Image (cartoon, rainbow, N blue to C red):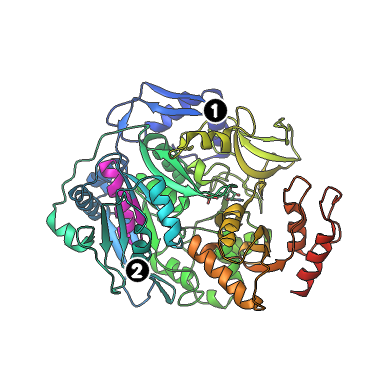
Amino acid sequence: MQITSFKQYEEDYKKSVENPEQFWGEVAQNFQWRKPWYKVLSWNFKDPEIKWFEGAKLNITENCLDRHLAANGDKPSIIWEPNNTEEESVTYTYKMLHERVCRFANVLKRNGAKKGDRICIYMPMVPELAIAVLACARIGAVHSVIFGGFSAKSIADRINDSQCKLVITADGAYRGNKQIPLKEVIDDALIGCPTVEKCIVLTHVRTPVSMLKGRDVWWEDEVKHVNDICEAEEMDAEDMLFILYTSGSTGKPKGVVHTCGGYMVYAGYTFTNVFNYKPGEVYFCTADIGWITGHSYIVYGPLSQGATSVLFEGIPTYPNPSRFWDIIEKHKVNTLYTAPTAIRSLMSFGEEPLIGKDLSSIRVLGSVGEPINEEAWHWFDEKIGHGKAPLVDTWWQTETGGIMISPIATVTPTKPGFATLPLPGIQPILVDEHGKEIEGNGISGNLCIKFPWPGMLRTTYGDHERCKQTYFSTYENLYFTGDGCLRDEDGYYRITGRVDDVLNVSGHRIGTAEVENAINMHAGVVESAVVGYPHDVKGQGIYAFVINPEMHGEAELTKKDILQTVTRVIGAIAKPDKILFVSGLPKTRSGKIMRRILRKIAEGDTGNLGDTSTLLDPAVVDEIIEAAKKQ
Ligand code: WTA
């Protein structure tokens, strides 16, 4: 199923469009099924209802573990690189990983988990996180991994939305020179989570934690009570595999639902092709498993292909900005898949951190999460790839399950700033605001997908209507991505960023409405409006315009109070970079905030604010501009 020439890409693409069922049916033969499908695809985008590989039975962990044991059992599956350099890295062979997953799956059963139960995972980037994820899949439980940067309230909202029965966490996490008290955060969350019966706690940083009798148990104790034999649960291709919460343009995050069969096929197929993975190579994705990139391209994609995946606990700048380069040298990494924000941050340290580092093992480079600016593209290409490693700029989303528009390494000619061409099976179209297709090349529009692919979301947990409204109702019979896009003269795609009220801060997706709700929870705040502005390292920064008449004369302290409130309500990742106190917001007569104007002010581009004649009180704009200048 690996594409090795551009001609083959063109042929496969053609076939995937003309005969999608045959195409995906053939790709799926490369996986292990307990029972074959009777129908490859049935679908409509109206409801929406999408089913891939109907009737087929499988367990994704048999594809990620068991099927590699006979020939590759002693091959490394996960290489763990700890945050602290004085600790040793740990290599798990496929045999070891299989054994740990089966054992922990039995721990889950022992603690009452069964097929279909939802399990929340809030853990550091340690091998046990991958083990917990796979153990859930082994027994058919649905995992909902929550990124370590979210607050107790965010966790509680997510746990309650999907009525999780069990939580898996650790005492704490290392993040550079900081420690994050994960169990403490979970304890706060669980005060408001009546469905949670058990909490399994891994010892990691050895910080004291409270352990509640009857609810909390230690990972290390539990694994002693079970053996390592655990038959995989037989799953239907369309049974739920996991939920992953993501932000949208409205206040509440949505639980994006992925199912077993289609997701597996899509994650595996895209992994092997986009990165041109060769058996025996070492692949390093720097994302966190708390995000979709970690799900698809640290755990499921690489393991389904028998690859060796590096799992890094730390951050790019700790103990110094050579860390990535040291890891590459130490583990002879062949593929590095990272985010533009990390590249820009490392670029800012100049060339010194690269001196004397052996990066000769690098064969393929990848970027994900936000548009990559040309300067960062060239730096990555030249300094890390030495101009020899194809750089794949991969566009996709939590909802798409896997990479959608991207070069295929060694096959597709790349172009800086461009995600280039759709992968086989992906049919993008650009539409104007009325949903009319804009045809031809050298054009821009809103990016939609007009045909299903196996990795696409099936629903949003507990609220199918929301899935329909968010993705399938803006334009009839199309999946709407929320991204703007350019198709150049060569037919190459360049993603220009979100066209909805979603920000992309250091590759983290954050809804403006969510941040506004959090700011508005501060006692003194009357109203707020949040917009993004260009930020050198983060891609976008968060700019908050806040009406707060009761500052007790202490603006700086009040700003800190607001930041503290946002940290409590969402988590530190959503803290505004700038707060400006204003006496009013630019609103239309119908009460809608004109964010367009605020965006211009946040960008410092107040020369031409466009038409402001529909504003209720145009004077407020001048006042905000003056205040912004003074800041
Ligand atoms: C943005 C991350 C430009 C885009 C996998 C998308 C990108 C959102 C790229 C999804 C890219 C992701 N070029 N923009 N290569 N990759 N995006 O759900 O706006 O965390 O809609 O998934 O990130 O973010 P999410």
Boundaries of the magenta span: 120-140
Q: Is residue 283 left or right of residue 116?
A: right
x and y percentages locating residue 157 in the rendered image: 43, 52
In the rendered image of this protein, does residue 606 appear above or below residue 464? below
Q: Position of residue 162 (x, y in %)?
A: 39, 45
Quadrant the N terminus occupies: top left
User: Which comes sooner in the sequence, label 1 or label 2?
Assistant: 1
| Residue indicated by mark 1 | 45
Left-right relation of 585 to 423: right
Q: CA distance from mark 1 to mark 2?
A: 43 Å
Residue 130 forms part of the magenta stretch = yes
Q: Residue 409 vs residue 619: left or right?
A: left
Q: Nearer the viewer, residue 63 or 58?
A: 58
User: Label 2 belongs to which residue?
Assistant: 172
In the rendered image, the quadrant that contains the C terminus is: bottom right
Secondary structure, mark 2, is loop
Query: Which quadrant would residue 559 be assigned to in this image?
Result: bottom right
| Residue 422 higher or lower than 155, as above or below | above
Q: Position of residue 491 (x, y in %)?
A: 69, 39
**Is label 2's Cβ within 8 Å of ligand 1?**
no
